[in-house]
Structures are given as C-alpha cells and as structure tokens.
Image: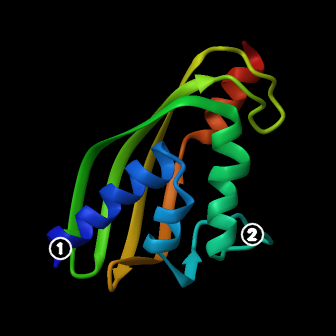
Amino acid sequence: MSEENKIVVRRFNQQVIAEGSRQAFEELVAPRFINRSAPAGTPNDRESLWRTFNQILFPALTDLQVRIEDQIAERDWVTTRKTITGVHSGELLGVAASGKNVTITVIDMVRIEDGQYVEHWGLNTLAHVVNQLKQD
C-alpha cells in the first residue's frame, strides 16, 4: 500500500502541479479533502487547493517543474520533500514578473484513501521567495 500511495503523490506532483491538469486533480483529490495547512480564516477544501495552483502558481511561473527529493510512506501517509522551480513570468502574489528563475522548497504530508488525497499538511518557502523577489 505504501508504494502505491507514493505513486499517487508522484502522479499528483507531475500531472497536477507541473502540468496543470484539472482532470488529474479531479481523479486524485477526494471531494472531502481537507488542507490542514491553509492559512487561518481561509477555505481549506478541495477547490481552494486547486485555486492555489490555478490562480497563484500557474499564472506566475512558466516552465514549472517538480523534483521529488525524498519520499517516505507509512500506513496511509506519504511525506514528500520536493523542489518546485519555474521562471517568474507573471505576477506572483503582487510582485510583477521578473524573468528570474525561482525555487520553492516544500515538505508535505498527504493522507491517501482509495488512491486519492483526503488530507494535507505542509510547509513551503513561497513567502520567502516572494520577499526575495520584492527586494531584487
């Protein structure tokens, strides 16, 4: 089961994050999904997860790539350390396109049931990246 769950997470990272596939998102994220890392007072449901990619990352970064650095699976949980890279070619959280290469590091834990994401916890360096772009 653990290896199958790792495959689900790798597929999500490639097809949803790197390629922007809404179809893969629909297949891989359960309707009852909960994002435990959503900022306080913001939605933490399935659609808000899609908006993170569709309204923040995809318009701001081209040549988006995800590299899995480490992955550990136990029971129904998969923990992944990954690097998301792209070219800052559109507005990113209020920062105009710079043409610079950006790197966002991420550690997330996802609970998988029946081949779908049902719960997520995560940390990332997006805020640091945005602050760095503001200073440049």
* Residue type pointed to by label 1: Ser
As rendered, which of 109 and 12 lies closer to the eye? 12
> Which residue corresponds to mark 2?
40
> Which residue corresponds to mark 1?
2
Residue 100's x, y, as percent? 61, 15
What residue is rendered at 56% in x and 60% in y? 22
Q: Nearer the viewer, mark 2 or mark 1?
A: 1
Against 42, residue 93 (above or below) is above
Q: Is residue 95 left or right of residue 50?
A: right
| Within-10-Å neighbours for mark 1: few <14, some 14–19, many 20+ | some
Against 46, residue 72 (above or below) is above
Against 33, residue 94 (above or below) is above
Quadrant showing the N terminus = bottom left
Residue 16's x, y, as percent? 48, 54
What residue is rendered at 49% in x and 49% in y? 17
Of the numbered discs 2 and 1, the one sitting upstream in the chain is 1
Residue 94's x, y, as percent? 84, 34
Q: Is residue 53 left or right of residue 103?
A: right
